[in-house]
Image (spheres, helix red, strand yellow):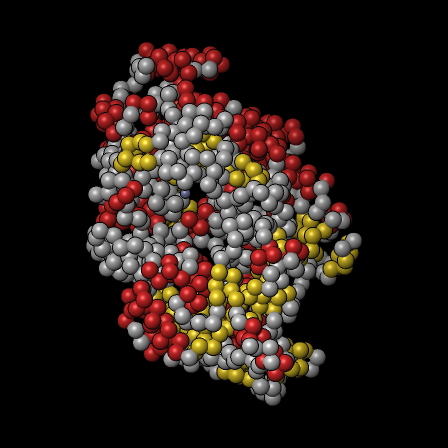
Amino acid sequence: MRHLPSIRHRLLPICILLALSSLIIFAQNKPQPMDEDFAKSVKEWTTRPEFISPLVDHLPKVAGVPSPKDVLGYHIGQPKKLTRTTESYRYYRALAEKSPRVKVLNIGQTDEGRECLVVIVANEDTVKNIEQYRGYLAQLADPRRITEAQAQEIIAKAKPIYHLMGGLHSGETGPPEMLMELAYRLAVEDSPVINTIRDNVIVTITPAAEPDGRDRYVDWYYRHKLDETGEQDSMGGPPYWGKYIFHDNNRDINYSQVTMRNLLEWYLQWHPPIMHDLHESVPFLYTFSGQSPQQPTLDPILYGELPWFANFEMSQMIKYGMPGVWTHAFVDMWSPGYLAFMSSNHNGMIRMYETFGNGGANTMKRKVDTGEGTGGGRQSPSSREWYRPSPPYKEVEWSMRNNTNFMQTGVLSALQLTSEFPKVVLENFYQKSRNSIESGKKDAPFGFVIPPQADMTRVQLVVNLLRLQGIEVGRATAEVKLKEGTFPAGSFIVKRDQPYGRLAKILIEKQNFPDPNLRTYDDTGWTMGLMTQTEIKEIADPGVLDVPVEPVGKLEIKGEVKGGGTTAYAIINRGSNNLVTLRYRLKDLKVQANEQVFKSGDIEIPAGSLIVAADGKAKTAVEQLGLTAVALQSMPTVLMHEVDLPRLAVYSTWGNTQEVGWVRHALDKFEVKYDLIYKERVKQGNLRDAYDVIIVPNQGRGGKGLVFDREPQRKPLAYTKSDQFKSHGVYGESEDITGGMGLQGALEFQKFVEAGGLVVTLGQASFFPPEFGLTRSIEASRPSTQFYAPGPIVEAEILQPQHPIFYGYAQKTIPVRYANGPLLNVPERDRDQQVLMRFPGADKSVLSGLMRGVAETRNRPAIVDVPAGRGRVILFATNPCYRWQNHGEFAMLFNTILHHNDIKTIEKKPAQTAEVK
Ligand SMILES: [Zn+2]
């Protein structure tokens, strides 16, 4: 059954057989020497005979070219072996040094200074002329510059790049191992399938998409997980992967994280028509085919391509006798924010696997059918379905080598298909690129206008976020007259008749989720104008395509100081997030805020503007940060307060650091200084002596989770730096990350507030103050089970516009991302004083994306400000710092920081007091 030559022969398509007959005769006449030790080891590590295929049960031995074992000392898939990036990079470089078919590119650095690599594997000639092949793909990616006939000529010469990524999610340990063996096999194996791949396809590999997290996880594995025997005694993972975020590195729609951006920049230079992201979760191998809801703006060709590949892989692997390979019914095609979507967003093809993995390299008994179902509680993962004709087993003994075998066989099948139809893949890539341009000429909206507006820093943000993704933005050279209105010269124009015009539409338009009964894997809404609270006009007038513009590179907005006063500057607050940066840059100066609006000449200075003595340093900061200041002849006479900077802490559990990470990332980007504190510091007490404000970001899924956090294990889980585990003890240190702050910690929070501190809770963390007595009068509840709100954007109504939290917000109703925080209830008698913002909760309040059961949010508080003891607690049911996304809400958090000790509760109105029972 597994006699190699005969199997290979049987699999051979006739055309290739003819085309490569001389090669095959050579291969069959003089079989390549095989690594007997590999075959024997792999057979031993594979837990059942059907868990391997004829594509991967052998490995050639080639004199002078190192196999993974030659460099690492072990074959891929050896139990209890994981490879750190330094070692895997050493392997790829050793391979590239000895094989002219392999090349290693450095594409940048991580937050922690590790390298990001891309490895290229193809035949010698292709690698030698790789720049030429890169050029062909760049030409196909922008069909405006070539004729149809030229396109056909290029397609005849070009080769598709098939990009593979492993290690985006650090706990999914198999792909970075498998990819090393794959690179070697593709470089050296002499067999019809591999030869055709090597000749017709350029394979590129991201060895570890999150190198910092890979190393931290491998350290964690060797430190804590080596003796795990099954799910029942799993010790879980480390508190961090990358510097800031976990799984959200696959939800970073604006490419805020440096490693993700490195990859995007590489993508836009190399244009791989296919990008395949290798994950781990469901058994045994799930291959993504883009189920509904589907992003309707993407090219319909894509939705034909996805099942084409998935079905080929599935039928090949079933043919090899491998069970449990399936497609459909897991991940949908709605959100464009997954990392590998950079491919489909740019007219390529996203591909994705989930292979079964053990979160380490131990062989374990795994219960596949836990009765919980997959993909939002649907079928059991071992049921037979039309898309799962050969289901996984209910229970299985699973090894790292099984994982390698399944994933590598799938990938080789996908590469085989690509190598058989390279021209079809290229034609499709070209056609999708051309269609994107054509659709911009035929289908409204034909473009978008971003007019100059009060706060230009958010225009800068939006333009640069679009530019980052390769979307062309122009600046109108004269006044623009369109059906939608007249826009001044200098307005920014995004025309849809460009290769990435469809992506511009996807990012900017309102998301109309097609069916409230469908579930989705991530957010349903992300409309950029709403999230950043920037005016972006959708244009249905085709005239926008002919507006003369000059191209915009990276946009820099220079701020200015207006007027000739010599006493003070009033730095106007129009909601820019950069105001907080300015305050921190001027930390040694006295800065005040006006509590009421005033005028300087014709210019209105809104409340919450920053008043500082006229000074060169202040002027420089205003200019650098794109802000506007007015030079005053005398200090304003309206009521002002000093904007003194708090001693700020951000509280993090050890068990849920991701959302804390997004807040840390935003604070770092805006140069806000803070201490990151954990249970260790909280339990020490005396918080008030050290801090004025503690922010508790969204975490813990409720008060109980926040307080008790990770369950204690059979031994302490240390996250401390040591010579052996250098990646640990970074961002914080703990001898045992389990157990949470406990009731003792909750009590310290209470003492902090009693003593005059300000606690600010975001999202789910806002269950904590009501549930643990910091805000006794407030109730926090959860919506019904019918309620479903996967990240929609909804209206919120500001009830106390004079409150410092809303400095810079000119509108009474603003768009916010619904955060699935608590449904708060404030007693009637306190509502007028304590509720700062609420959700109107009407059907029309859902501005983008899906909220099922909107009435449950009707008039529920969105922000509550509760005096407690000598301090106060501010509860956000929203999350004013959601990923790198809702920039329009960030200022509410920054205002809370800046004005922490100038927040007052408004006077009770006599009429309302009468209603109190
Ligand atoms: Zn994953």
> Residue, x 46% and y 41% (percent of image)?
377
Seen from the viewer's position, the closer of residues 103 and 205 is 205
Q: Quadrant of the N terminus?
A: top left
Seen from the viewer's position, the closer of residues 367 and 414 is 367
Q: Is residue 107 visible?
A: yes
> Residue, x 35% and y 62% (percent of image)?
707
Is 291 on the left or on the right of 540, as rendered? left
Residue 907: percent from the left, percent from the top?
57, 82
Outermost residue on the front side: it is 917
Residue 543: percent from the left, percent from the top?
76, 49
Number of numbered tags placed on the structure image: 0
Residue 629: percent from the left, percent from the top?
60, 76
Q: Quadrant of the C terminus?
A: bottom right
Residue 82 image-quadrant placement: top left
Q: Can residue 612 be seen in this view?
A: no
Is 497 on the left or on the right of 400, as rendered? right
Above or below, 37 against 177 in this view is: above
> Residue, x 35% and y 68% (percent of image)?
746
Q: Quadrant of ligand 1?
A: top left
> Residue, x 45% and y 60% (percent of image)?
764
Seen from the viewer's position, the closer of residues 872 and 909 is 909
Above or below, 481 against 691 in this view is: above
Residue 147: percent from the left, percent from the top?
66, 32
Is 507 on the left or on the right of 734, as rendered? right
Residue 140 image-quadrant placement: top right
Above or below, 367 against 751 in this view is: above
Above or below, 871 against 634 in this view is: above
